[in-house]
Image: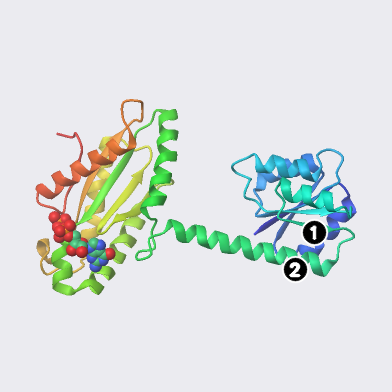
Amino acid sequence: MKILVIDDDAWALEHLAKLLGDLAEVHTALGGIQGLAETARILPDLILCDIDMPDIDGLLFCRHLQADVFTKNIPILCVSSCMDEGEELAALTAGAVDVIRKPISPMLVRARVRIQIELCEKSEMLLDLSRRDPLTGIFNRRYFDGRMRDEWTRHRRMREPIAVAMVDVDHFKAFNDHYGHVRGDECLMEIADRLRHATRRPGELVARYGGEEFVMLLPGTSALAAGVFGKRVCEDVRAMKYPHARGKNGLISVSVGLATAVPDESIMISELIRRADMALYTAKKDGRDCHAVFGAG
Ligand SMILES: Nc1nc2c(ncn2[C@@H]2O[C@H](COP(=O)(O)OP(=O)(O)OP(=O)(O)O)[C@@H](O)[C@H]2O)c(=O)[nH]1
């Protein structure tokens, strides 16, 4: 948890930093301009900002942060030496979450900062929960969709290939029928864990797409590299040696369909996913426990 304290008065700055030092990692900035630079550099979780500063005042500072998508959600506690109701309202309207009065009461400042830290931690937890699949703990489809959109735009700009792998557990209905749903759930958790370990490179991601189907996002991956990846995923799951009485060779296995594209105006994300799905269908038709790359013969 990083707190940035901004004040044009060096003494007040040091006093506040000392007061909060045991609650979080405290950074300081002398004045609004330095405050903006420090915000961009460290992206703090919480900011305490004096209102009355000669370069950029606290209200303008709040508006700057509100206007930027990367900083608009950082809570700002404004510190004011003015007892004016109008200024307090202006600060709250500009985006501050609360206003602290100078001369500060150390106990009240600490209590207010603690509340904000707790709120930050709770919203971080909720954000994480909203991104995850409750059974397996890996990312869910909604998070995958968002990341895919971001990566698609980035790859389009860089004119680089991006690949998607659809991974489907083989004969899973038979697994459930034979061992029951609880064992089925346990099996999905183990497979998710194995797939998570298979995504090693930065930017790679695995998500539960639904039911017994997983999706993997592979940035900067050509068709050739996608094929190598698909083969390794099948091998990794095979190596689990997870018993499946009605599976191929008595073990759990997966089929993997992959598709790759350099994003441009001729193709949409949904088309890439459809191609990966078609490749998955090919892998199932080829006998399962194998991979297929769309368009690769
Ligand atoms: N235990 C458990 N089973 C699930 C879950 N989600 C989906 N399933 C089961 O997964 C099975 C998927 O069956 P099918 O779509 O027929 O596919 P399959 O039996 O794996 O056959 P192939 O894909 O052709 O190899 C169904 O029986 C679903 O009930 C889950 O969260 N937990």
**Which of the 4 quarters of the picture holds residue 151?**
top left
Q: Amino acid at mark 2?
A: Ala
Estimate the x, y position of residue 196 in percent, counting from the top left.
36, 57
Considering the image in quadrants, where does the N terminus appear? bottom right
**Residue positioned 85% across, 60% down in the render:** 15
Q: Is residue 124 left or right of residue 206?
A: right
Residue marked by disc 2: 111
**Which of the 4 quarters of the picture holds residue 71?**
top right
Query: Could you tell me if residue 192 is visible in this image?
Result: yes
**Residue positioned 18% across, 35% down in the render:** 296
Q: Amino acid at mark 1?
A: Ala
**Residue positioned 26% across, 36% down in the render:** 223
Is disc 2 placed on a helix, strand or loop? helix
Task: Tell me the mark number nearer the camera, choosing from 1 and 2.
Answer: 2
Estimate the x, y position of residue 5 in percent, counting from the top left.
77, 53
**Which of the 4 quarters of the picture holds residue 158?**
top left
Of residues 161 and 229, the one nearer the viewer is 161
**Ligand 1 picture quarter:** bottom left
Residue marked by disc 1: 17
Is the residue marked by circle 2 packed among few (<14), some (14-19), or many (20+) residues within 10 Å?
A: few
Considering the image in quadrants, where does the C terminus appear? top left
Q: Is residue 61 left or right of residue 45?
A: right
Q: Is residue 258 above or below residue 97?
A: above
Marked residue nearer the N-terminal end (1 or 2): 1
Q: Which mark is residue 198?
A: none
